[in-house]
Image: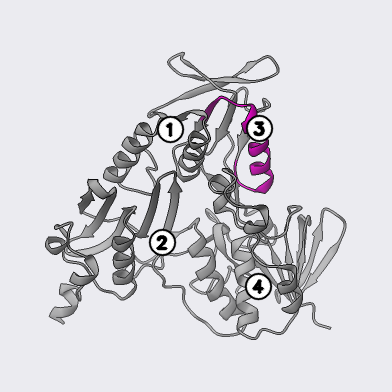
Amino acid sequence: MADGLLIIGSSQAGVSLATSLRALGYADPITLLGDENHRPYQRPALSKEWLQGEITNESLMFRTQEYWLEHRIDVLKNERIIRIDKRDDGSGVAHSMSGREFAFDRLALAVGARPRRLLLDGVDLPGVLYLRNADDALELKARVPDVRDVVVIGGGFIGLEAAASLTKMGRSVTLLEAAPRLVPRAVGEQTSAYLLDHHRAAGIDVVLDAEVRRIVARGDRVGGVELADGRVVPADLVLVGVGVLPNTELAESVGLVCDNGVRVDESALASDGVTVAVGDCANLPNPVPGAPDGDRVRFESVNNAVEQAKVAAYAITGRREEYAGIPWFWSNQGALKLQIAGLSSGHDRTLVRADPERGKFSVLYYRGDRILAADCVNHPLDFMAVRAALSKGLSIPYDAAADPSVQLKSVTVEPAALVAD
């Protein structure tokens, strides 16, 4: 009997790969390994709806047990792979910390990323938490009832989402961001300023250019966060969200090329030409049309995990398809729903479309006359129009979009360069 495909990692990318393969008619055995003691679950809601008690544990689950059985996908919990013996043809054996061995004909890595840890005095105190997986969320949720003052370190998506949730739950929240603005890697300056004004108005004490010196104790647990200027911000709980690092150790151990993730081609194939890597752990050629040659990216998004898994499934079944989608992201932060379409890198001008009375705000990014991306806050029509235009190779004229009452989908056109051809 064939050993089939072994997928290490049972979050969004791993689950999407397994389900995509069965949808394509792949008949070989599929084993899906997770290193947590939980069934495969969705992570985005952990910092928002689940933390606030708006959805149940069962709502987080990707699929029912009946689905896995019906589709012959062997899902195993609590199996952490510590060593892989891989042959030149891509087959081999994976060894788990439990002592079990998993033989495979082909390997897929969907091992994700881990939180970047702070290297400061006091980080090991009880009450200093990270939020990446279900166990992190369970601990956070269990501690919240006994907490009044919370310090969130990190003004990225996770930090802002958690800060908004905890504020809504009645906690006093201070958010510390080392950069001069919020979410500096993902959104532009106008969007950062909009988010800052909103979260401060919602009651979050946002401190920018914050240099954290150490975490201080109160008795035997966390008591506050000391800044470089000597100020100590009181804290019954400290939540750290300062980015993630891709898990590349297993890939490196079997000789795969890694650089800010496992390097893969447009079909999600790693450097050995057989193993696939998908999701947060994968470093892939920039899929955006017109991206510079050699430009590579590593996306941390549900959309990327799903779309890249589809391409990887094609590769495993012998059909080469290139990942050439338009990246998009979202972040729910209290009353704000931020949606991002495209990548704004390389833009040379921006256009703000604001409707203060209806709480809608968008920033469009252009290079010359060509639209590259958009940040849309509570403005789904703008988001959908820009995403659709980018996916079809179309553009939205700057001058036409300058009127915020104009629906963007009504002014979408062929780019001037294409018209000229």
Neighbor class of circle 1 (other Cα within 10 Å; few <14, some 14-19, many 20+) is many
- Judging by the rendered image, the residue that carries numbered circle 2 is 328
Q: Is 191 positioned to the left or the right of 119 in the image? A: left
Provide the secondary structure element on which disc 2 rests: strand
Name the amino acid type tagged 2: Trp
- Alpha carbon separation for disc pair 2 and 4: 22 Å
Task: Give yes or no for residue 313 being in the magenta stretch.
Answer: no
Q: Secondary structure at mark 1?
A: loop
Q: 383 or 14: nearer the eye?
A: 383
Report how far apart the C-alphas of labels 1 and 4 lie in the structure.
38 Å
Q: Amino acid at mark 4?
A: Ala
Residue 142 shown in magenta: yes
- Main SS of the magenta part reads helix
From the image, state whether disc 4 or disc 3 is nearer to you.
Answer: 3
Residue indicated by mark 4: 18
Tell me where residue 119 appears, x and y as whole percent: 58, 30
| Residue wearing tag 3 | 143
Magenta-highlighted residues: 131-151
Residue 5 coordinates in the image, percent (x, y): 72, 74
- Classify 311 as above or below 146: below
Q: Nearer the viewer, mark 2 or mark 3?
A: 3
